[in-house]
Image: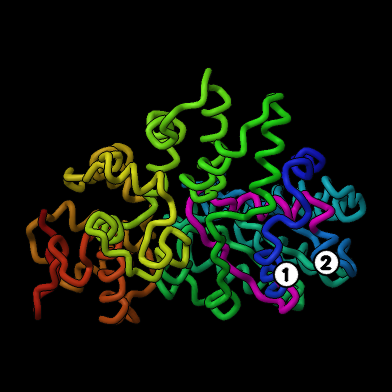
Amino acid sequence: MDAKYFESLYPVDSWDKDLEKVVGYIKEGNSLQLIGLPGVGRSNVLGLLAYNKAIRLRHFPKNHDLVHFVVINFAEIKERSYTDTLKFIFLCLLNSLRERELRTEYEKVDTIFKDSLSYADELVFAQNLKNTVEYLAIEKKLTLIFLCQNFDDYIPQVSDRFFTLLRSLRDKAKYRFSAIFSVARSLEEMLEPQILSGFSDFVIGHTIYLPLVDKPSMEFRISYLEKLVGEKISNNVKEDLIRVTGGHMRLLIVSLEAILGSEKTPNNISDFLLAQKTVKSVLISIWQDLNPSEQVAIRNGDLTDPYLSLIGLVKDSKLCLPIFAEGLTQGLFKENQAKFLYDTQSNTIKRGEVVISDTLTKGEFRLFRYLLEHQGEVTERETIISAVWKDDKSSAGITDQAIDQLIFRLRRKIEEDPANPKLLQVIKGRGVKFSQ
Protein backbone atom coordinates (compact mmCIF):
# COMPACT_ATOMS: atom_id res chain seq x y z
CA MET A 1 0.00 0.00 0.00
CA ASP A 2 1.27 3.47 -0.93
CA ALA A 3 1.00 5.39 2.36
CA LYS A 4 1.24 8.80 0.67
CA TYR A 5 -1.67 7.88 -1.61
CA PHE A 6 -3.77 6.73 1.33
CA GLU A 7 -2.96 9.89 3.32
CA SER A 8 -4.07 12.02 0.38
CA LEU A 9 -7.59 10.58 0.49
CA TYR A 10 -8.56 11.42 4.07
CA PRO A 11 -8.09 14.37 6.46
CA VAL A 12 -6.55 13.91 9.88
CA ASP A 13 -9.89 14.15 11.71
CA SER A 14 -11.56 11.35 9.72
CA TRP A 15 -13.70 9.07 11.92
CA ASP A 16 -12.23 10.92 14.89
CA LYS A 17 -14.63 9.77 17.62
CA ASP A 18 -14.64 6.19 16.34
CA LEU A 19 -10.86 6.02 16.29
CA GLU A 20 -10.76 7.41 19.82
CA LYS A 21 -12.84 4.42 20.92
CA VAL A 22 -10.59 2.04 18.99
CA VAL A 23 -7.49 3.46 20.67
CA GLY A 24 -9.19 3.19 24.07
CA TYR A 25 -9.65 -0.57 23.64
CA ILE A 26 -6.09 -0.99 22.36
CA LYS A 27 -4.61 0.85 25.35
CA GLU A 28 -6.58 -1.45 27.64
CA GLY A 29 -5.02 -4.45 25.92
CA ASN A 30 -8.37 -5.54 24.54
CA SER A 31 -9.54 -6.49 21.09
CA LEU A 32 -12.67 -5.18 19.39
CA GLN A 33 -15.18 -5.49 16.58
CA LEU A 34 -15.77 -2.82 13.96
CA ILE A 35 -19.31 -3.26 12.64
CA GLY A 36 -21.16 -1.46 9.88
CA LEU A 37 -23.10 -1.73 6.65
CA PRO A 38 -21.21 -2.54 3.45
CA GLY A 39 -19.60 0.61 2.07
CA VAL A 40 -19.55 2.75 5.23
CA GLY A 41 -15.76 2.60 5.46
CA ARG A 42 -14.73 -0.24 7.77
CA SER A 43 -11.69 -1.10 5.62
CA ASN A 44 -10.87 2.60 5.32
CA VAL A 45 -10.73 2.99 9.10
CA LEU A 46 -8.33 0.05 9.36
CA GLY A 47 -6.29 1.48 6.50
CA LEU A 48 -6.01 4.83 8.24
CA LEU A 49 -4.50 3.17 11.29
CA ALA A 50 -2.01 1.24 9.21
CA TYR A 51 -1.01 3.78 6.58
CA ASN A 52 -1.92 7.32 7.67
CA LYS A 53 0.94 8.61 9.82
CA ALA A 54 -0.81 11.90 10.66
CA ILE A 55 -3.77 10.00 12.09
CA ARG A 56 -1.52 7.67 14.09
CA LEU A 57 0.28 10.69 15.56
CA ARG A 58 -3.07 12.27 16.41
CA HIS A 59 -4.31 9.22 18.31
CA PHE A 60 -0.98 7.93 19.65
CA PRO A 61 0.87 11.16 20.48
CA LYS A 62 3.30 9.29 22.75
CA ASN A 63 5.38 6.36 21.49
CA HIS A 64 3.40 6.11 18.26
CA ASP A 65 6.41 4.35 16.68
CA LEU A 66 5.96 1.48 19.15
CA VAL A 67 2.42 0.74 17.94
CA HIS A 68 2.61 -1.64 15.00
CA PHE A 69 -0.38 -2.43 12.78
CA VAL A 70 -0.58 -5.59 10.67
CA VAL A 71 -3.19 -5.61 7.89
CA ILE A 72 -4.57 -9.14 7.32
CA ASN A 73 -7.10 -9.37 4.50
CA PHE A 74 -8.98 -12.58 5.27
CA ALA A 75 -10.76 -12.49 1.92
CA GLU A 76 -7.46 -13.69 0.41
CA ILE A 77 -7.49 -16.95 2.38
CA LYS A 78 -11.13 -17.80 1.95
CA GLU A 79 -11.54 -21.60 1.79
CA ARG A 80 -7.86 -22.17 2.60
CA SER A 81 -6.52 -24.49 5.30
CA TYR A 82 -5.59 -23.49 8.84
CA THR A 83 -1.91 -24.00 7.97
CA ASP A 84 -2.32 -21.57 5.07
CA THR A 85 -3.90 -19.11 7.51
CA LEU A 86 -0.82 -19.30 9.74
CA LYS A 87 1.47 -18.77 6.73
CA PHE A 88 -0.59 -15.83 5.56
CA ILE A 89 -0.49 -14.13 8.97
CA PHE A 90 3.29 -14.61 8.98
CA LEU A 91 3.57 -13.06 5.50
CA CYS A 92 1.37 -10.09 6.47
CA LEU A 93 3.51 -9.53 9.55
CA LEU A 94 6.66 -9.63 7.43
CA ASN A 95 5.16 -7.23 4.91
CA SER A 96 4.22 -4.76 7.66
CA LEU A 97 7.78 -4.77 9.01
CA ARG A 98 9.22 -4.21 5.54
CA GLU A 99 6.83 -1.31 4.85
CA ARG A 100 7.94 0.41 8.05
CA GLU A 101 11.59 -0.32 7.18
CA LEU A 102 12.18 -2.14 10.47
CA ARG A 103 15.09 -4.06 8.98
CA THR A 104 16.43 -5.79 12.09
CA GLU A 105 12.97 -7.02 13.02
CA TYR A 106 12.20 -8.00 9.42
CA GLU A 107 15.36 -10.10 9.07
CA LYS A 108 14.73 -11.87 12.38
CA VAL A 109 11.10 -12.70 11.54
CA ASP A 110 12.05 -13.71 7.99
CA THR A 111 14.53 -16.23 9.41
CA ILE A 112 11.87 -17.67 11.71
CA PHE A 113 9.37 -17.88 8.83
CA LYS A 114 11.82 -19.68 6.53
CA ASP A 115 12.64 -22.11 9.32
CA SER A 116 8.90 -22.83 9.63
CA LEU A 117 8.64 -23.50 5.89
CA SER A 118 11.40 -26.11 6.08
CA TYR A 119 9.29 -28.16 8.53
CA ALA A 120 5.94 -27.61 6.76
CA ASP A 121 4.16 -28.53 9.99
CA GLU A 122 1.13 -26.77 11.44
CA LEU A 123 2.37 -27.00 15.03
CA VAL A 124 5.76 -25.56 14.07
CA PHE A 125 4.10 -22.65 12.26
CA ALA A 126 1.88 -21.91 15.26
CA GLN A 127 4.74 -22.09 17.77
CA ASN A 128 7.06 -19.95 15.65
CA LEU A 129 4.31 -17.36 15.21
CA LYS A 130 4.02 -17.21 19.01
CA ASN A 131 7.81 -16.86 19.29
CA THR A 132 7.73 -14.06 16.71
CA VAL A 133 5.06 -12.11 18.59
CA GLU A 134 6.98 -12.60 21.84
CA TYR A 135 10.18 -11.28 20.22
CA LEU A 136 8.48 -8.20 18.78
CA ALA A 137 6.43 -7.38 21.88
CA ILE A 138 8.86 -8.22 24.68
CA GLU A 139 12.30 -7.63 23.17
CA LYS A 140 11.38 -4.83 20.75
CA LYS A 141 8.58 -3.33 22.91
CA LEU A 142 6.11 -3.17 20.03
CA THR A 143 2.36 -3.25 20.62
CA LEU A 144 1.00 -5.45 17.83
CA ILE A 145 -2.44 -4.79 16.36
CA PHE A 146 -3.85 -7.33 13.90
CA LEU A 147 -6.27 -5.55 11.55
CA CYS A 148 -8.58 -8.36 10.41
CA GLN A 149 -10.12 -7.02 7.20
CA ASN A 150 -13.07 -8.80 5.56
CA PHE A 151 -13.28 -11.23 8.45
CA ASP A 152 -16.84 -12.13 7.36
CA ASP A 153 -15.27 -14.07 4.46
CA TYR A 154 -13.39 -16.25 6.94
CA ILE A 155 -16.44 -17.12 9.07
CA PRO A 156 -17.34 -20.34 7.16
CA GLN A 157 -13.98 -21.93 8.00
CA VAL A 158 -12.94 -20.34 11.28
CA SER A 159 -12.40 -22.78 14.14
CA ASP A 160 -11.71 -22.63 17.84
CA ARG A 161 -8.00 -23.17 17.06
CA PHE A 162 -7.82 -19.73 15.51
CA PHE A 163 -9.15 -17.90 18.56
CA THR A 164 -7.11 -20.09 20.92
CA LEU A 165 -4.06 -19.00 18.91
CA LEU A 166 -4.99 -15.32 19.34
CA ARG A 167 -5.22 -15.83 23.09
CA SER A 168 -1.77 -17.46 23.09
CA LEU A 169 -0.35 -14.55 21.10
CA ARG A 170 -1.82 -12.11 23.60
CA ASP A 171 -0.30 -14.09 26.49
CA LYS A 172 3.11 -14.17 24.78
CA ALA A 173 2.96 -10.42 24.16
CA LYS A 174 2.11 -9.72 27.81
CA TYR A 175 -1.00 -7.84 26.66
CA ARG A 176 0.83 -5.81 23.98
CA PHE A 177 -1.50 -7.38 21.46
CA SER A 178 -4.96 -6.62 20.05
CA ALA A 179 -7.07 -7.74 17.10
CA ILE A 180 -9.64 -5.58 15.33
CA PHE A 181 -12.27 -7.56 13.44
CA SER A 182 -14.05 -5.85 10.56
CA VAL A 183 -17.43 -7.58 10.40
CA ALA A 184 -21.03 -6.91 9.37
CA ARG A 185 -22.39 -8.43 12.59
CA SER A 186 -21.00 -9.24 16.00
CA LEU A 187 -18.87 -12.36 16.31
CA GLU A 188 -21.07 -13.67 19.11
CA GLU A 189 -24.04 -13.52 16.76
CA MET A 190 -22.26 -15.20 13.85
CA LEU A 191 -20.24 -17.86 15.67
CA GLU A 192 -21.04 -20.77 17.95
CA PRO A 193 -19.91 -20.04 21.52
CA GLN A 194 -17.39 -22.90 21.58
CA ILE A 195 -15.55 -21.44 18.56
CA LEU A 196 -15.08 -18.04 20.17
CA SER A 197 -14.60 -19.25 23.76
CA GLY A 198 -10.79 -19.11 23.73
CA PHE A 199 -10.78 -15.37 23.03
CA SER A 200 -14.24 -14.23 24.09
CA ASP A 201 -13.09 -12.44 27.25
CA PHE A 202 -11.05 -10.00 25.19
CA VAL A 203 -13.47 -9.21 22.37
CA ILE A 204 -17.13 -9.72 23.34
CA GLY A 205 -18.77 -6.45 24.33
CA HIS A 206 -16.01 -4.37 22.72
CA THR A 207 -18.01 -3.18 19.75
CA ILE A 208 -17.92 -0.04 17.64
CA TYR A 209 -20.71 0.58 15.13
CA LEU A 210 -19.57 2.85 12.33
CA PRO A 211 -22.10 5.55 11.40
CA LEU A 212 -23.49 5.90 7.89
CA VAL A 213 -21.65 9.17 7.41
CA ASP A 214 -18.37 10.65 8.58
CA LYS A 215 -18.56 14.34 7.69
CA PRO A 216 -14.82 15.22 7.49
CA SER A 217 -13.95 12.29 5.22
CA MET A 218 -17.12 12.80 3.15
CA GLU A 219 -16.38 16.46 2.45
CA PHE A 220 -12.75 15.70 1.74
CA ARG A 221 -13.58 12.92 -0.73
CA ILE A 222 -16.05 15.15 -2.59
CA SER A 223 -13.38 17.83 -2.93
CA TYR A 224 -10.78 15.24 -3.97
CA LEU A 225 -13.06 13.83 -6.67
CA GLU A 226 -13.82 17.31 -8.03
CA LYS A 227 -10.10 18.05 -8.33
CA LEU A 228 -9.49 14.70 -9.96
CA VAL A 229 -11.98 15.33 -12.78
CA GLY A 230 -11.42 19.08 -12.90
CA GLU A 231 -15.09 19.91 -12.47
CA LYS A 232 -17.03 21.55 -9.65
CA ILE A 233 -20.44 20.34 -8.53
CA SER A 234 -23.01 22.95 -7.51
CA ASN A 235 -23.92 23.17 -3.84
CA ASN A 236 -27.54 22.32 -4.64
CA VAL A 237 -26.54 19.07 -6.35
CA LYS A 238 -24.15 18.20 -3.50
CA GLU A 239 -26.88 18.74 -0.95
CA ASP A 240 -29.29 16.62 -2.97
CA LEU A 241 -26.76 13.81 -3.28
CA ILE A 242 -25.93 13.86 0.43
CA ARG A 243 -29.63 13.87 1.27
CA VAL A 244 -30.66 10.96 -0.96
CA THR A 245 -27.61 8.82 -0.09
CA GLY A 246 -27.73 9.68 3.61
CA GLY A 247 -24.02 10.46 3.34
CA HIS A 248 -23.24 6.73 3.00
CA MET A 249 -19.63 6.83 1.75
CA ARG A 250 -19.73 4.28 -1.06
CA LEU A 251 -23.18 5.32 -2.25
CA LEU A 252 -22.16 8.97 -2.30
CA ILE A 253 -18.96 8.34 -4.26
CA VAL A 254 -20.56 6.21 -6.99
CA SER A 255 -23.43 8.72 -7.18
CA LEU A 256 -20.97 11.59 -7.59
CA GLU A 257 -19.12 9.72 -10.30
CA ALA A 258 -22.41 9.11 -12.12
CA ILE A 259 -23.35 12.80 -11.94
CA LEU A 260 -19.89 13.92 -13.10
CA GLY A 261 -20.07 11.48 -15.99
CA SER A 262 -23.48 12.75 -17.08
CA GLU A 263 -23.77 15.33 -19.86
CA LYS A 264 -26.25 17.38 -17.86
CA THR A 265 -27.58 17.50 -14.33
CA PRO A 266 -30.68 15.28 -14.07
CA ASN A 267 -34.00 16.78 -12.98
CA ASN A 268 -34.83 13.88 -10.68
CA ILE A 269 -31.73 12.75 -8.76
CA SER A 270 -33.31 9.60 -7.29
CA ASP A 271 -34.63 8.28 -10.62
CA PHE A 272 -31.30 9.03 -12.28
CA LEU A 273 -29.30 7.22 -9.60
CA LEU A 274 -31.58 4.18 -9.51
CA ALA A 275 -30.91 3.76 -13.23
CA GLN A 276 -27.14 3.48 -12.60
CA LYS A 277 -25.68 -0.03 -12.29
CA THR A 278 -23.04 1.05 -9.77
CA VAL A 279 -25.64 2.62 -7.48
CA LYS A 280 -27.96 -0.38 -7.73
CA SER A 281 -25.04 -2.70 -6.96
CA VAL A 282 -24.28 -0.87 -3.69
CA LEU A 283 -27.95 -0.83 -2.67
CA ILE A 284 -28.35 -4.55 -3.38
CA SER A 285 -25.23 -5.36 -1.36
CA ILE A 286 -26.78 -3.53 1.62
CA TRP A 287 -30.05 -5.42 1.15
CA GLN A 288 -28.34 -8.81 0.89
CA ASP A 289 -26.38 -8.07 4.05
CA LEU A 290 -29.66 -8.17 5.98
CA ASN A 291 -31.03 -11.53 7.12
CA PRO A 292 -34.46 -12.75 5.89
CA SER A 293 -36.34 -11.60 8.98
CA GLU A 294 -34.89 -8.08 8.72
CA GLN A 295 -35.77 -7.90 5.02
CA VAL A 296 -39.37 -8.94 5.75
CA ALA A 297 -39.61 -6.41 8.60
CA ILE A 298 -38.40 -3.58 6.36
CA ARG A 299 -40.84 -4.55 3.62
CA ASN A 300 -43.64 -4.48 6.19
CA GLY A 301 -42.54 -1.12 7.57
CA ASP A 302 -41.52 -2.59 10.93
CA LEU A 303 -38.34 -0.70 11.75
CA THR A 304 -38.07 -1.53 15.45
CA ASP A 305 -35.19 -4.02 15.29
CA PRO A 306 -32.33 -2.55 17.42
CA TYR A 307 -29.71 -3.83 14.97
CA LEU A 308 -31.10 -1.64 12.18
CA SER A 309 -30.64 1.40 14.41
CA LEU A 310 -27.17 0.37 15.57
CA ILE A 311 -25.88 0.17 12.00
CA GLY A 312 -27.47 3.52 11.18
CA LEU A 313 -29.98 2.25 8.63
CA VAL A 314 -32.90 3.37 10.81
CA LYS A 315 -33.38 6.40 13.04
CA ASP A 316 -36.57 7.50 14.76
CA SER A 317 -38.43 4.64 13.01
CA LYS A 318 -37.43 5.92 9.57
CA LEU A 319 -34.98 4.64 6.96
CA CYS A 320 -31.94 6.91 6.86
CA LEU A 321 -31.16 6.15 3.21
CA PRO A 322 -33.84 7.79 1.04
CA ILE A 323 -32.43 6.19 -2.11
CA PHE A 324 -32.63 2.77 -0.40
CA ALA A 325 -36.27 3.43 0.55
CA GLU A 326 -37.01 4.54 -3.01
CA GLY A 327 -35.34 1.42 -4.38
CA LEU A 328 -37.55 -0.68 -2.12
CA THR A 329 -40.64 1.12 -3.42
CA GLN A 330 -39.59 0.61 -7.04
CA GLY A 331 -39.03 -3.13 -6.55
CA LEU A 332 -35.23 -3.09 -6.76
CA PHE A 333 -34.96 -5.78 -4.09
CA LYS A 334 -36.60 -8.90 -5.46
CA GLU A 335 -38.19 -11.38 -3.09
CA ASN A 336 -36.26 -14.63 -3.20
CA GLN A 337 -38.86 -17.35 -3.69
CA ALA A 338 -36.34 -19.96 -4.81
CA LYS A 339 -35.77 -23.06 -2.72
CA PHE A 340 -32.60 -23.81 -0.79
CA LEU A 341 -30.37 -26.27 -2.65
CA TYR A 342 -27.12 -28.03 -1.86
CA ASP A 343 -24.77 -27.93 -4.85
CA THR A 344 -22.57 -31.02 -4.68
CA GLN A 345 -20.14 -29.80 -7.35
CA SER A 346 -19.27 -26.53 -5.60
CA ASN A 347 -20.05 -27.80 -2.08
CA THR A 348 -22.20 -24.73 -1.45
CA ILE A 349 -25.75 -24.06 -0.33
CA LYS A 350 -27.66 -21.67 -2.54
CA ARG A 351 -31.02 -20.01 -2.72
CA GLY A 352 -31.44 -19.13 -6.34
CA GLU A 353 -28.23 -17.32 -7.31
CA VAL A 354 -27.42 -16.30 -3.73
CA VAL A 355 -24.78 -18.44 -2.00
CA ILE A 356 -26.10 -18.89 1.53
CA SER A 357 -23.19 -20.98 2.79
CA ASP A 358 -20.91 -17.91 2.74
CA THR A 359 -22.73 -16.74 5.88
CA LEU A 360 -22.70 -20.09 7.70
CA THR A 361 -20.18 -21.48 10.15
CA LYS A 362 -18.86 -25.02 9.72
CA GLY A 363 -21.40 -26.39 12.16
CA GLU A 364 -24.33 -24.54 10.58
CA PHE A 365 -23.24 -25.61 7.10
CA ARG A 366 -22.95 -29.27 8.06
CA LEU A 367 -26.34 -29.26 9.77
CA PHE A 368 -28.06 -27.47 6.89
CA ARG A 369 -26.40 -29.70 4.27
CA TYR A 370 -27.58 -32.83 6.06
CA LEU A 371 -31.12 -31.49 6.44
CA LEU A 372 -31.26 -30.53 2.74
CA GLU A 373 -30.14 -34.04 1.79
CA HIS A 374 -32.85 -35.52 4.05
CA GLN A 375 -35.73 -33.10 3.52
CA GLY A 376 -39.01 -34.10 5.12
CA GLU A 377 -37.33 -36.63 7.41
CA VAL A 378 -37.17 -36.32 11.18
CA THR A 379 -33.51 -36.20 12.18
CA GLU A 380 -32.70 -37.40 15.69
CA ARG A 381 -30.25 -35.52 17.87
CA GLU A 382 -27.71 -38.36 17.79
CA THR A 383 -27.69 -38.08 14.00
CA ILE A 384 -27.21 -34.31 14.23
CA ILE A 385 -24.20 -34.83 16.50
CA SER A 386 -22.74 -37.33 14.04
CA ALA A 387 -23.33 -35.02 11.05
CA VAL A 388 -22.06 -31.82 12.66
CA TRP A 389 -19.32 -32.89 15.03
CA LYS A 390 -18.04 -35.91 13.06
CA ASP A 391 -14.45 -34.61 12.94
CA ASP A 392 -14.22 -33.95 16.67
CA LYS A 393 -12.14 -36.38 18.72
CA SER A 394 -15.06 -36.90 21.05
CA SER A 395 -18.71 -35.98 20.81
CA ALA A 396 -19.49 -37.09 24.35
CA GLY A 397 -19.59 -33.51 25.63
CA ILE A 398 -22.10 -32.23 23.08
CA THR A 399 -25.13 -31.05 25.04
CA ASP A 400 -28.76 -30.53 24.07
CA GLN A 401 -28.13 -26.84 24.67
CA ALA A 402 -25.34 -26.80 22.04
CA ILE A 403 -27.68 -28.42 19.51
CA ASP A 404 -30.50 -26.00 20.37
CA GLN A 405 -28.14 -23.04 19.93
CA LEU A 406 -27.02 -24.36 16.55
CA ILE A 407 -30.64 -24.74 15.37
CA PHE A 408 -31.46 -21.26 16.67
CA ARG A 409 -28.49 -19.70 14.83
CA LEU A 410 -29.38 -21.45 11.58
CA ARG A 411 -32.99 -20.27 11.86
CA ARG A 412 -31.84 -16.67 12.21
CA LYS A 413 -30.02 -16.97 8.90
CA ILE A 414 -32.72 -18.72 6.84
CA GLU A 415 -36.14 -18.05 8.41
CA GLU A 416 -38.24 -14.98 7.71
CA ASP A 417 -39.57 -15.19 11.25
CA PRO A 418 -37.21 -17.23 13.46
CA ALA A 419 -39.70 -17.06 16.36
CA ASN A 420 -42.32 -18.77 14.19
CA PRO A 421 -40.24 -21.01 11.91
CA LYS A 422 -41.76 -22.50 8.78
CA LEU A 423 -38.73 -24.35 7.41
CA LEU A 424 -36.85 -25.82 10.35
CA GLN A 425 -39.21 -27.48 12.81
CA VAL A 426 -38.43 -29.16 16.13
CA ILE A 427 -40.51 -32.31 16.57
CA LYS A 428 -40.81 -32.68 20.32
CA GLY A 429 -39.28 -35.88 21.64
CA ARG A 430 -38.05 -36.96 18.20
CA GLY A 431 -35.72 -34.43 16.57
CA VAL A 432 -35.83 -31.80 13.84
CA LYS A 433 -37.28 -31.69 10.33
CA PHE A 434 -36.57 -29.38 7.42
CA SER A 435 -39.09 -28.98 4.64
CA GLN A 436 -39.80 -26.30 2.05
Q: Which residue is mark 1?
A: 23
Q: Which quadrant is the N terminus positioned in? A: top right
Q: Are marks 1 and 2 in contact (CB under 8 Å)?
A: yes
Q: Quick check: is 190 in the magenta stretch?
A: no
Label total for image:
2
Kind of residue at badge 2 = Phe
258 up-or-down from 388: above or below? above
The picture places residue 170, in percent across and down from the top left corner, at 69, 73
Looking at the image, which residue sits at the far right?
104
| Point 67% across, 55% down: residue | 46
The picture places residue 200, in percent across and down from the top left corner, at 53, 77
Q: Is residue 190 visible?
A: no
Secondary structure under badge 1?
A: helix
Q: Earlier in the sequence, mark 1 or mark 2?
A: 1
> Which labelled disc corresponds to residue 60?
2
The picture places residue 63, in percent across and down from the top left corner, at 89, 68
> Which labelled disc corresponds to residue 123?
none
On the rendered structure, is 184 left or right of 361? right
261 up-or-down from 47: above or below? above
Residue placed most toward the observer, 370 or 102: 102
The picture places residue 209, in percent across and down from the top left corner, at 54, 65
On the rendered structure, is 199 left or right of 309? right
Query: Which scheme is used to colour this image of the protein?
Result: rainbow
Secondary structure under badge 2?
A: loop
On the rendered structure, is 97 left or right of 420? right
| Point 71% across, 55% down: residue | 14
